[in-house]
Amino acid sequence: MSFHAIRGRTHYNKAPELPAKATLLTQTTPSASTAPPLAAEVVIIGAGPCGLFQVFELGLLGISAHLVDSLAHPGGQCAELYPEKPIYDIPAIPVCGAQELVDRLMEQIKPFKPTFHLGHEVVEFARKENGRFNLVTSGGTTFDAGAVVIAAGVGSFQPRRLGIEGIDAHEGGAIHYRVKTAAEFAGKRLVVFGGGDSALDWVLELLPRAAAVDLIHRRPEFRAAPASVAKMREQVAAGRMRVFEALPHSLITDHGKLRGINIKTPDNAIHALDADQLLVFFGLHPKLGPIAEWGLPLEKRALKVDTEKFQTSLPGVFAVGDINTYPGKKKLILSGFHEAALAAFAIQHHLFPQKKQFLQYTTTSPVMHQRLGVPD
């Protein structure tokens, strides 16, 4: 849903990309110069799996959260880069798709009613004299926050674009840098660029659905998993697809519609390939963005934290998931979930230092059941 502040009242409209079983509140506010700051117990920067699970762990402790993400939808890297790829290392779930994991997390946090500020980037950050934090987003939203959790992964992702003339008119239509669903390419003639895991994974996934698939890579060696490369070569040997060592040269269009692409081989020959859609997997530029300018200690573009609280050098600012680093750090979703759980208790103590902490179990605690909406 989208939320609009109108003379002190609230008005809700359904958002187009709401996951099937999730409640999503996105907020648009007037510019920071006219709107008062939003008071928040916690602001979470990043709505990927770790950011979403942080909402859950905070919610169990009775702490509410706002989430800010530069993407237009929750899910972070999982939803943006490989929504249909399987994940095998989530406890008690033998296998689930990346988007499925995001949808499950969205369902799990429904009882805590977080507010999402999607399509926003935090562009200003400052600690106030009273120990709280002032944050301003690119969308003009200002927060007065008691604590901040940075769950921004490796930063925002910018795709490496197809570097030929005329692509602007076709990006988002016939030229794609990511795949949301394989079904949208059924019956299409596809030309795929790239030699890494994303390119090979999607070639193998789309091959049974597409009318034709050509794979273009600038050199004969591939960077993808050997098993994927072997499967791809089997399909080539069987005549089900073609592979070219080449570079993109120029688009082939007819009255503004993409009809194919010319490629240039190492012998400088130009070959025309028919195509309805181009899929480009040249990789992504991870951008840490303004976080790098906040004065927090960094090590190899990651925020240094302790392993008791997952707090940065600045009290009240925590970091979980791929954005942080510490001795023995492993960049796994599983590790990020553990970090979010411990960070939640540290945040509770930071916000309410006089409050005695009790470890309560969701299986037996009436308080937890009430917060989760579990029937008596």
Image (cartoon, grey):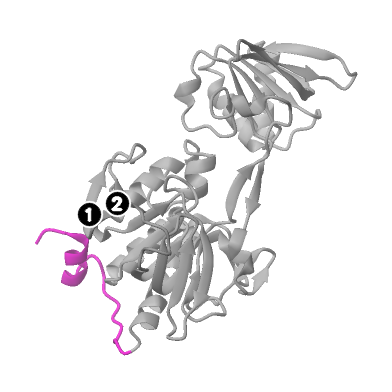
Q: For numbered disc 2, what is the local secondary structure?
A: strand
Q: Main secondary structure of the magenta part?
A: loop
* In magenta stretch: residue 361: yes
355 to the left or right of 324: left
Question: Can you tell which quarter of the image residue 262 is in?
Answer: top right
Q: Quadrant of the N terminus?
A: top left
Is 192 magenta? The answer is no
Image coords of residue 198 (percent x, y): 61, 35
Q: Is residue 275 left or right of residue 91?
A: right
Inspect the image, locate mark 2, and give the three-letter code of the amino acid beneath it. His
Identified at 39% across, 72% down, the residue is 144
Residues tagged 1 and 2 counted as in contact (Cβ below 8 A): yes
Pinpoint residue 117: horizontal percent, then vertical percent: 40, 54
- Disc 1: CA contacts within 10 A as few (<14), some (14-19) or many (>=20): few
Q: Residue 154: x percent and y percent?
A: 59, 56
Q: What amino acid type is highlighted by mark number 1?
A: Thr
Label 2 crowding class (10 Å Cα cut-off): few <14, some 14-19, many 20+?
A: some
Chain part drawn in magenta = 354-376
Of the image marks 1 and 2, the number of the one nearer the N terminus: 2
Q: Which residue is mark 2?
A: 4
Q: Nearer the viewer, residue 31 or 338?
A: 31
Residue at the farthest left position: 376
Residue toward you, 204 or 237: 204
Position of 161 compared to 350: left or right? right
**Residue 238: which quarter of the image?**
top right
Distance from Cα at disc 1 to Cα at disc 2: 6 Å
Quadrant of the image containing the C terminus = bottom left
> Could you tell me which residue is drawn at 45 percent across and 73 percent down?
134
Q: Secondary structure at mark 1?
A: strand
Q: Residue furthest right?
A: 267
The residue identified by callout 1 is 10
